[in-house]
Image: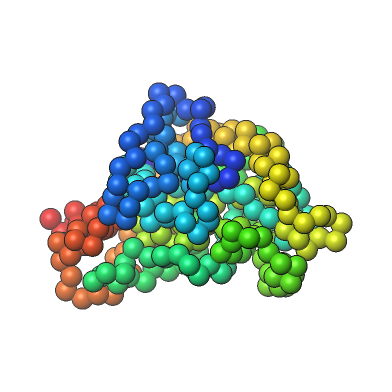
Amino acid sequence: MTVKLGIIGGSGLYDFAEMQEKEWLPRNEGPFGLPSDEILFGKINETEVFFLPRHGRNHVYSPTTVPYKANIDALKRLGCNVLISISAVGSLREDLTPGMFVIVDQFIDRTFAREKTFFDKEVVAHVSMAQPICTSTAKMVMKAAKSLSIQTVFGGTYLAMEGPQFSSYAESQLYRSWGCDVIGMTNMPEAKLAREAEMRYTSVAMVTDFDCWHENEGNVEVTDIIKVLHENASNAKLLIKAFVENYKKDCSQEIIDGIDNVLDTAIITQNFSEETLINCGLDAIASRIINAGK
């Protein structure tokens, strides 16, 4: 598979200067509005990479107002088929300390004020989120982390809260009792939308704090989070670079897991046409199906 990598940078990660042949692409409005910012195009070892700061370069979008649909649509239109999300999270476990990375493999979605599907007009689809990330890509990211000796844990459940306020003590304890490992505000509906777009999504969560459950730690403060994020940002960029450099040899055979054609078994609407998909703004999201019908 020819890789076009999309990177969504979370809090503290607003640029990716390590790429070659860099160029900020125009911020074009699509059927779902404007993406968060211009998209930075560049190359790493001849692999095309597209970097989008989730909150905008000046961090102007809250977790609720991030234009998730526009972001995924914009990256899909550029041909991205592998998507790595980098996010700041709070830890809900004693052994996941600030500075560590967690490669998330499950989610609990507690957000409630966001649009969560592309398929809400005329065409309805129900994609499976049983395995919400691309395991093959996640394993390659983990391999890259090990090669750099970045303290990283493979697997963990991400509790997505609405925000922008941090948790209450009662909420933090509740999420711990559910077996959640980290808590954040942005991977949902991002992961769901990426799956609908048939993109291989992997989440790298950067631990910045202990939320507010830990008796020996203070309450979450933005200043403390930013300090840890700045320390983690360089590691995150090194991780992406190492992942890209090793991707071709790690992915020597075709990956067959259903992500690339998930819409074949997800669309429940009968007798829809390619024109209907286009009129619904799905010309990029459902491009494979549209092209197959021509």
Q: Where is residue 139 in the image (x, y as percent from the top left)?
A: 56, 49
Q: Is residue 17 above or below residue 161?
A: above
- Left/right placement of residue 163 relative to residue 98 reads left
- Left/right placement of residue 75 relative to residue 52 reads left
Q: Position of residue 292 (x, y in %)?
A: 19, 56
- Left/right placement of residue 61 relative to residue 155 reads left
Residues 223 and 83: in front is 223
Q: Where is residue 161 in the image (x, y as percent from the top left)?
A: 59, 64
Q: In this view, does 124 lie above or below 238?
A: below
Q: Which residue lies at the image location 42% right of the left edge and 55% below the top edge?
A: 68
> Would residue 93 be seen by someone viewing this image from the given angle?
no
Residues 67 and 189: in front is 67
Extreme top residue here? 21
> Would residue 80 be seen by someone viewing this image from the given angle?
yes
Q: Which quadrant of the rendered structure holds the C terminus?
A: bottom left
Q: Which residue lies at the image location 56% right of the left edge and 39% below the top edge?
A: 13
Applied colour scheme: rainbow
Q: Which residue lies at the image location 35% right of the left edge and 48% below the top edge?
A: 34
Q: Is residue 176 above or below residue 219?
A: below
**Residue 270, picture quadrant:** bottom left
**Residue 280, picture quadrant:** bottom left
Residues 130 and 196: in front is 196
Residues 170 and 271: in front is 170
Q: Which quadrant of the rendered structure holds the N terminus?
A: top left
